[in-house]
Image (cartoon, rainbow, N blue to C red):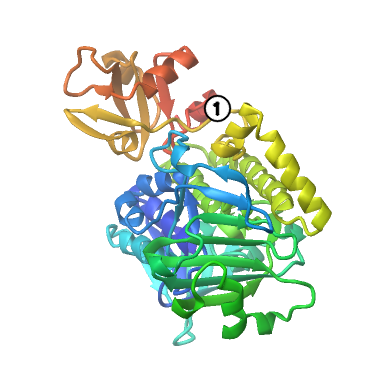
Amino acid sequence: MEFDVVVVGCGPVGALTANLLGTRGVRTLVVERDTAPHRQPRAFSCDDEALRIYQQAGLLDEVAKDMYAPRRAEYVNAKGRVFATVALDEVDFGLGSAALHFFDQPRLEAALRAGLDRFPHVTLRTGVELMRLTQDDRAVTVVLRDLDTGTETEVRARYVLGCDGARSTTRVAAGITLTGTSYAEPWLAVSGEVGPDAVRVPHTTFVCDWRRPAFVSPGAFDTYRLEFMLRPDEDPAQVTSPAAVARLVAPYVDPDRFTVTRAVVYTFHHLVAERWRDRRVFLLGDAAHQMPPFLGQGLCSGLRDAANLTWKLALALRSQAPDTLLDTYEAERRPHTEAMARTSVRLGRVFLVRNRVAAFVRDVVLRAVQTVPRVRRLVRHFEFKPLPALPDGRVMFPQPEVVVGGVRRLLDDVLGPDFAVIGPGVDAGTARDWSGPRARFLRMVADGEPHTENDLVDVTGTLTAWFARHRTDVVVLRPDRFPRSDRDFATAG
């Protein structure tokens, strides 16, 4: 049996990867040990870039309807006094969605798996695990075992993508090791269901109590998420008891009306695979990198991996790009992932101060520096979060609403899944002279200018400002919506 790609793991990253491959016509086999989507709400948050990636897979409406966008996030001290606020309802990074969303992982995974049904060339096999793999110059041979029958089968694929999490079997089979740090501090994560009238802290809150740092927040579908750092003398087995959980959650929700769906102790990691590619095997998501949770970027980073790699694989499989284009996956993704991890670590140092005097100094200093307008704006508008950018400084192209043919839509819905060439300088000659892969060509006009039914009208002024700022009248956008460089054009042409 032969496929273009085998995706190992069908969690959120694996399922999204398979959907993106499906949109590009890639014959894909997805294998997953579990027989049903994960029923526990492990992952919890995603950002505007993640929603834009779901949009590229044609699933924005399906996943966004089940999400909750908080209006603000507060940092409070041990007495509950706010010393910093992120005004999320004022933050707009220009990517087409709110800056932060909370979701229910079982519902998300179900929507992503249902999306695979759109593609006759994508096959999902559950209850199947990867046993081993071997590579040659043309393909990878994977040996799969059916967990129900014990039967082993061989499958050949041009490439294998390991999306199988922190304990990745794919990573082990490829002989790739992890480097970094595992933090010793255990945390208790509690998820549950609660009615609005039983919520005592209604906003996303980082409780910077030097005695017990915590994170609490409402979520989607009347759920609530709480995470507490454990003290050195606490027994992880005891803190998950109903009585212990009730005591911990009581300041934030009414424990008598809070139905716990998950209470587990975990530790977090700052780990990166030594390499993300071994010839025809690639690692994505937690298989490639794990980071502290304080910026909520673990899952988002895996989705970015998928958005970066899948269009390149599609070009290589169609012989429209050399295999060396695939080397740019790690080169482009690793620096941004490591920047996110460093920012998360720095945020954790603020959040996790465990000394009373140091916590007092932190509170005083943070309140003081925010009297400076620039610093206050940096905190309030979440400007400390690294932008979606490539190592050479290219930033993801904005996504405003535009009008084409009299219909107002988000930009990516107009551009489609392939390359796009847009700008006020696009004309018939632009398409005639194009020597790159399949692309959509659109002339952009400012709002109020004469235009045809086929023109893209910049009704918000966002794109007009972008072209003026960059002193150009045409831009080539890659399928992941970063402006292309000369290197992209050479390797993907």
Where 69 sits versus 442, above or below?
below
- Residue 277: give x, y in percent of width and height: 62, 51
User: Above or below — where is 63 with respect to 96?
Assistant: below
Residue 302 falls left or right of residue 335:
left
For the C terminus, give its image quadrant. Answer: top left
Q: Residue at x 42, y 25 (%)?
A: 476
Q: Which residue is mark 1?
A: 487
Return the x and y of residue 67 as percentages of the image width and height: 38, 56
Side (left or right) of 434 relative to 272: left
Most foreground residue, 468 or 345: 345
The amino acid marked with disc number 1 is Arg
Across and down, in percent, residue 32 comes to: 46, 71
Answer yes or no: is residue 176 visible: no
Residue 96 shows up from this direction: yes
Quarter-of-image position of residue 384: top right
Q: Residue, x 26% and y 24% (percent of image)?
A: 456
Seen at 75% across and 46% down, the residue is: 362
